[in-house]
Amino acid sequence: MTARSEAADFWENPKDAEQFLKKLSAVKYWVTTIDNIQRELDDYAVLEMMAQEEEENGNESQMQAEVAWQEKKMNGLIEELETRSMLGEEGDNLGALLKINSGAGGTESNDWSAMLLRMYTRWGERNGYKVNVHEVLDGDEAGIKSAVVEFEGEYAYGYLKSESGVHRLVRISPFNAQGKRQTTFSSVFVYPLVDESIEIVINPSDLEWDTFRSSGAGGQNVNKVETGVRVRHIPTGIMVENTETRSQLDNRQNALRILKSHLYEMELEKKRQKQAELEGQKKKIEWGSQIRSYVLHPYKMVKDLRTGYETTDTTAVLDGDLNEFMRSYLLLETKK
């Protein structure tokens, strides 16, 4: 596969080349990760043997701690590979757009949205994604009312799709003079970052061609020869005429180009409608629609209400340590 990418004519068809490189990247990921696991497994076996020998010789050994650390490292790689194997749905391999919107609660909710923005930005940075934040609408006093985060890189959507829903925060509000505990909500919604270049493939049998004599300026040849063309796309009923030139062949090509433009716009409209349907899945930002709860007072706990996964390390979670939550969600989805 690598030899093909190094061929002199590799970039003659840029779209095919890009698709090939994506496939090559996926194969390299699996090969590299499996090789890494094998190396860690070999290291683990050596450390375990050394620890056993020292124990048999009656020596107190520090090797057991190294064995435990190596085992944890190895299991982490295996879990990473298992998680990637669960990302097989259409769109999982794409980048992602993540939208954050504050719920009711004013400044408190806006501050929570800013905390979520930092959390997801940190997650992206920690996991090797190119992160771009835009469309930020600042809060009146603090925080943000909304923002969009773009994650460029493979499988960002596959991981982040688990984050769509309402996130609930319970804490002592820094904006409350009485120091009362408050509950606030913000919503997160994730979209696949689709490449705008849509390739339109038209089946020739779906086209109905006709020719006619052109009228208007262009000289005698325009009027006497059937240079005008008309094409109808049978599945959609779209019809295009073209009389731009005095060449029937050129006009056919122009008509086909215009037809593809029409079909491209239809695909964009389908995408917009699909996104609107996804938007319609959003629930009202209220108590009953939350997916995850972040409690900072009177105790510390982050719990996913769909999977039951929880942790008391709230600081790590808010610093972007979300992979176990995502993994738990993917495991749940594969069981459905």
Image: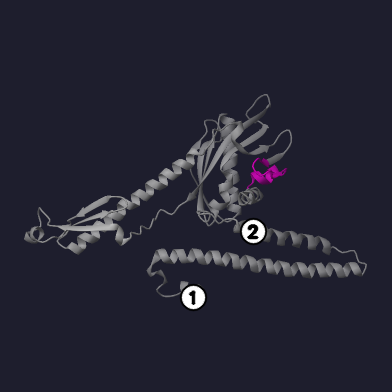
Amino acid type, label 2: Glu
Q: Position of residue 177 (x, y in %)?
A: 65, 25
Q: Which of the 4 image quarters holds residue 129?
A: bottom right
Q: Which of the 4 image quarters holds residue 309?
A: top right
- In the depicted view, which residue is nearer to us: 328 or 148? 328
288 relative to 47 in the view: left or right? left
Q: Position of residue 213 (x, y in %)?
A: 12, 57
The residue at which mark 1 appears reads as 3
108 relative to 178 in the view: left or right? left
Q: Is residue 311 above or below residue 140?
A: below
Q: Which of the 4 image quarters holds residue 143?
A: top right
Amino acid type, label 1: Ala
The residue at which mark 2 appears reads as 82
In this rendering, does residue 198 appear at all? yes
**How many residues crowd mark 2 within 10 Å: few (<14), some (14–19), many (20+)?**
few
In the rendered image, residue 305 lying in the magenta stretch gets the answer: yes
Secondary-structure class at tag 2? helix
Question: Residue at point 73% right, 33% down?
Answer: 298
Image: magenta residue range: 303-321
